[in-house]
Amino acid sequence: MSHSPLLEFADPPAEMVDAVQGAFSSARTFVKKYDPTLVVSFAPDHYNGFFYDLMPPFCIGYEAMGVGDYSTTEGPLSVPTERAEELAPSGGAGDRSSAAAGPGEGRTL
């Protein structure tokens, strides 16, 4: 589920808050019931640690760190590195380049 920096700072009508929280709850319930063994996230390109001059057209995350902004998780995130490597398209002899901004920001393809 994506986040909005305005979620905690805006004061929308109660029925809108209830609708958004209900959607979050439905998504959580669906995922728990489905009980996936692997989640592949196709997500926006606004991750902390990527600067536009280093942003590739796409990336496959081998490792990830949450920065804890806007009430999100801070610290290492669970990423099955070996599985990510298997899912990555073959672009040579396993050649990877790092476009991360700093230590712990992860490896990218």
Image (cartoon, rainbow, N blue to C red):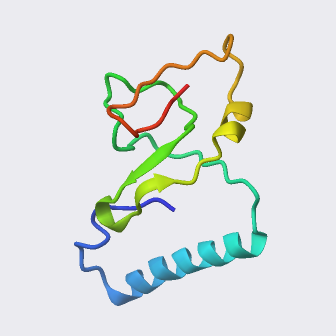
Instruction: Tell me which corner region of the image, top left, top right, bottom left or bottom right, holds residue 81.
Output: top right
The answer to whether residue 97 is above or below residue 67 is above
Instruction: Tell me which corner region of the image, top left, top right, bottom left or bottom right, holds residue 92.
Output: top right
> Which of the image's four quarters has the C terminus?
top right
Q: Residue at x 76, y 58 (%)?
A: 37
Q: Residue at x 50, y 31 (%)?
A: 107
Q: Nearer the viewer, residue 14 or 49?
A: 49
The answer to whether residue 39 is above or below residue 58 is below
Q: Position of residue 50 (x, y in %)?
A: 36, 34
Q: Position of residue 47 (x, y in %)?
A: 39, 44
Instruction: Tell me which corner region of the image, top left, top right, bottom left or bottom right, holds residue 48.
Output: top left
Q: Residue at x 49, y 19 (%)?
A: 97
Residue 68 as seen in the image, left or right of residue 26:
left
Residue 56 as seen in the image, left or right of residue 103:
right
- Of all residues, the one furthest to the bottom in this rendering is 14
The answer to whether residue 27 is above or below residue 42 is below
Q: Position of residue 89 (x, y in %)?
A: 70, 24
